[in-house]
Image (cartoon, helix red, strand yellow):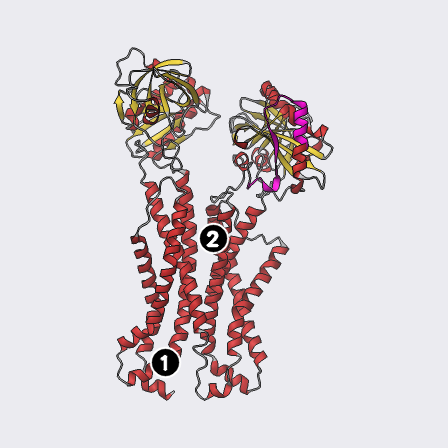
Amino acid sequence: MVFSLAIGMFCFIIASVYIDFEYTRNSNHKDADRVYRVMVEMVEDGRHTYLPYSFASEIGVLHPEIESVSLLDIVPGGELYLTTNEEDYIKERSCYYADEGLFDVFTFPLKFGSQANAFSEINNVVISANLSEILFKDENPIGKSINVHKKGTFQVSGVFEDVPSKSLLNPGIVFTREQMYKDDPRRKDSWVNFTHVKVMNGVNQYELEENLFRTYKNLFPEGKFVGVFSENLNDTYWGYSYADYAGGAQNSSFIGANKALINTVGYVALGILLCAIVGYLSLSLGLSLKRSKEIGVRKVNGANRKDIQQQLLSESIFYAFMALLITIVSLELTGDYFTKLFGVPIGIDYSKFDLLIELFVFTLITGILAGLYPAFVISKLNPVKILTGYNGPQSAGFGLKRVLLIIQLVVTIILVFGTVVQIEQVKKMLSFDFGYNKESLLAFQIERDTKIQENYTAILNEIQSLEGVKRTSGGPFPYTMNGYRSLKYDKGDTLIQDDVALVLVANNYFDLMDIDIVEGNSFTESNVPSIYSTCVINEALAKQLGDNIVGQVINFGDVNRRVLGVAKDYTDWGLSSPDADPRVFVVSEKNSFHSILIKHDGEHTAQLIRKLEAVWRSHERVISPEVINLETKKDWTVDREEKATTLTGFLSTMVFVLSLLNLLGYSVMYAGSKLKNISIRRILGAESLELFLHLVKPFFTSLGVSLTIALPIAYWLMNQYLNDYAVRIDLNPLQAILVSFIMFLAVLLVVGFQLLKTSRVNAIDKLKE
């Protein structure tokens, strides 16, 4: 009984913590409701893009309604390497250029240093508390130097306090904007990645956009933009800007910024809580009715109806707080697991007094709701009837309980069906044929460092000499291509022009990857004098260019190239986009492909990866190596679906257990109400099997009604769900049969023992009672 409530409270609290986190993103920033990210609208398709610096730098001066402006840019390259001793380097991925407005617009208090002097010198940097702890331990680092690989030496002018987890932005190291112009003078005439403004109280967002666009037109009358677009800081997680924030965002949940799915988690959790209360109600009422003689004695001794109600309500509230204790312990034990599953922190912050009060009130209300109906029914019992052998209103509310049971079973069936379908969908995605052979394949990424590329030949020889390495090549993985180039093909009566993806490869790329050449030859099979003036295209491009393309010359990237062959299409964008886009494969003269691709014998893979990393470090000791096992690398779509399946499986298990507990309580009460009837029928000669089948009939009738209602809904919901997947399974009757069998077996096991015992009751002894 307590366990039933604990399950409901556990699921509801987890969902509440998750939903609260998602809906309060960026709430750590003071006056977030007055902060807007500003962009300009392009002509095509109403898209938005960054503000030009020449415009962004003027808006604070020209608009008095704007209190402050922050210009924030991402450091190119994605990662930097920092050290204080020229020996031990730390990789930092969250790197920005900023101005003084960063502290005026956002709430980033400093642990060390002052905001006024943070960017006073060109070589100043502000670092995160975590980075400060790693580089300087417990020391105050203000005034101390940090060496940034390939960038220079900088002086620490500030240390951020720990940034709350709800902030999308979590800077690791911030340079001055003057340093950005020193690194690349062209950026002063370029764009600003993030332009944020803090406006005065009462400023209307749409009037702000109109005023800013008016200023833009005055400054740039020939400008190509058609409007200004703004997004409030509280809305950036849900809006257009999230894609830009996502690269450095903290705690990106696997569900993503999808309000419908996030709310669905809440609705299901609320449903589980209600199911838990219903289950508690059934069990509580069943057990309370067994105490009817105790209630009768208390009434004879002077207890009134109100006293009985208070007793039963107090017991219910006590059980609710016991359930809360179980919930809290369970959260402490499983918090890390659910944090990893959801991708956001899951747990209770005991330092927040308001949260503790909310938990207390929530538990109190849950206890009252769960105990109200049993207290109302039991307190009405007549003590004279009870003490003279009346068993109480054993059949009271059976109609309502049956309806509630059917509703609960419908929810359970839908969730179980969803879990079964998701498991099959994951299997389908894991078995998907990408069109190339990933078995025993490693990618040694060389495009990350010029020093590695310059020593390509020596590094390749070292790799080929390693034990276990069978063959090597070069290609795009784990990425897809090397940008786009213009393509022109004179078809005689038609000039085909398009921008097509370039894929730089080694000459034996198709052989190593087991990619079939469906027409013509591969690079290794060709007998042309120079493969560097040739190319291979894929089927998607061949269809676009027309028949008999092999042997023809195309102009690609302003270079005339003869088409040697047509390669079979393969999936390189992943399962979210399995259809191949047009590709032109070119042998790289300077080994500029993304990775050295390594086929190995499949044994001691981890050991081989360590040896490959050692090869990298023998040539580059600062930048860390990246060796990817392509055989085990999961597609992000599969990873998301596996997490969704885990979540659905967890929720369906909880509802399943609650339904069985409710079913158990219902069966106990039902069996008690039928004891006298069954005893009479046994005396009249009825067999135990006949009586058992009679007793279980209403339960399986309820299950049949539930399946009839739930399965069509489940099929429709899962079909809508699967429509979002490019690679998906087909729904079929076998899934419904499997779910029906699971539910049939579960109902039989739960109610069977209790009702079998009732069907075999000693009729004479029971009637004597």
Q: Which mark is residue 651?
A: none
Task: Name the residue rendered at 29%, 85% in the picture.
Answer: 683
Is 606 within the magenta?
A: no
Q: Using the rendered view, name the quadrant where residue 66 is placed.
A: top right
Q: Position of residue 353 (x, y in %)?
A: 63, 55
Other residues around mark 2 within 10 Å, as few (<14) / some (14–19) / many (≥20): few
**Numbered circles on residues, count:** 2
Q: Which mark is residue 334?
A: 2
Q: Quadrant of the C terminus?
A: bottom left
- Label 1, on which residue? 675
Pointer 1 or 2: first along the chain: 2
Which amino acid is tagged 2?
Thr
User: What is the span of residues highlighted in magenta in the rendered image?
Assistant: 211-238
What is the x, y in percent for residue 112?
Answer: 66, 36
Q: Nearer the viewer, residue 443 or 239?
A: 239
Q: What element does badge 1 sit on?
A: helix
Q: Do we see residue 564 in this rendering?
A: yes
The location of residue 505, given as percent across then percent down, is 36, 22
Describe residue 20's horizontal placement relative to residue 631 as left or right: right
Asked if residue 112 can be seen in this view, the reply is no
User: How far across and how far down the image is residue 324, in percent?
Assistant: 53, 62
Q: CA distance from mark 1 to mark 2?
A: 44 Å
Q: Residue furthest right?
A: 64
Q: Considering the numbered disc 2 on the image, is that residue within a helix, a strand or a loop? A: helix
Q: In which quadrant of the rendered view does residue 511 lie?
A: top left
Q: In which image quadrant can residue 96 be found?
A: top right
Mark toward the viewer: 1 or 2: 1
Residue lying at the far top in this picture: please name it.
529
Residue at image location 42% in from the left, 14% down from the top: 558
**728 or 364: nearer the eye?**
728
**716 up-or-down from 522: above or below:** below
